Amino acid sequence: MKKRKIKVGDLVKITRPAIGIPRDTVGLVMSADFADSGFRYYKTKMIGVDMAARRFLGRDLEVVSESR
């Protein structure tokens, strides 16, 4: 399967668990930015998890549904 480029507004699934967020949790990409190290990260608001938006690297996300 071809990996799709992640954009703001995409619905994504977490492929690597994080503290308080299990794998396969679905979220909405709110913004994208670059860290000082040069890696691109995506600020993502998780659905069904009561916490603030978290940052994830693109390699830890899988696009479920693309935004228009």
Image (cartoon, rainbow, N blue to C red):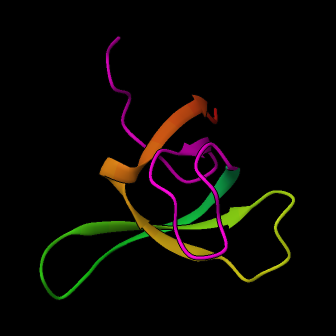
Q: Is residue 4 magenta?
A: yes
In the current view of this chain or complex, which residue is farthest to the bottom? 36
In this rendered view, identify the residue nearer to me: 24 or 44. Answer: 24
Seen in the picture, residue 10 relative to 32 is either above or below; the reply is above
- Quarter holding the N terminus is top left
Q: Left or right: where does residue 37 sit relative to residue 3?
A: left
In the current view of this chain or complex, which residue is farthest to the top? 1
Q: Left or right: where does residue 62 sit relative to residue 2?
A: right
At 17% from the left edge and 88% from the top edge, which residue is drawn?
A: 36
Q: Position of residue 4 (x, y in %)?
A: 38, 28
Q: Position of residue 14 (x, y in %)?
A: 54, 49
Seen in the picture, residue 66 relative to 1 is either above or below; the reply is below
At 58% from the left edge and 49% from the top edge, which residue is drawn?
A: 23
Q: Left or right: where does residue 12 sit relative to residue 62?
A: right
Seen in the picture, residue 4 relative to 13 is either above or below; the reply is above
- Quarter holding the C terminus is top right
At 73% from the left edge and 83% from the top edge, which residue is drawn?
A: 52
Q: Position of residue 30 (x, y in %)?
A: 62, 65
Q: Is residue 55 magenta?
A: no
In the current view of this chain or complex, which residue is farthest to the left? 37
- Residue stretch rendered in magenta on the structure: 1-25
Among the 4 quarters of the image, the one containing residue 56 = bottom left
Query: Which secondary structure class fits the magenta region best?
Result: loop
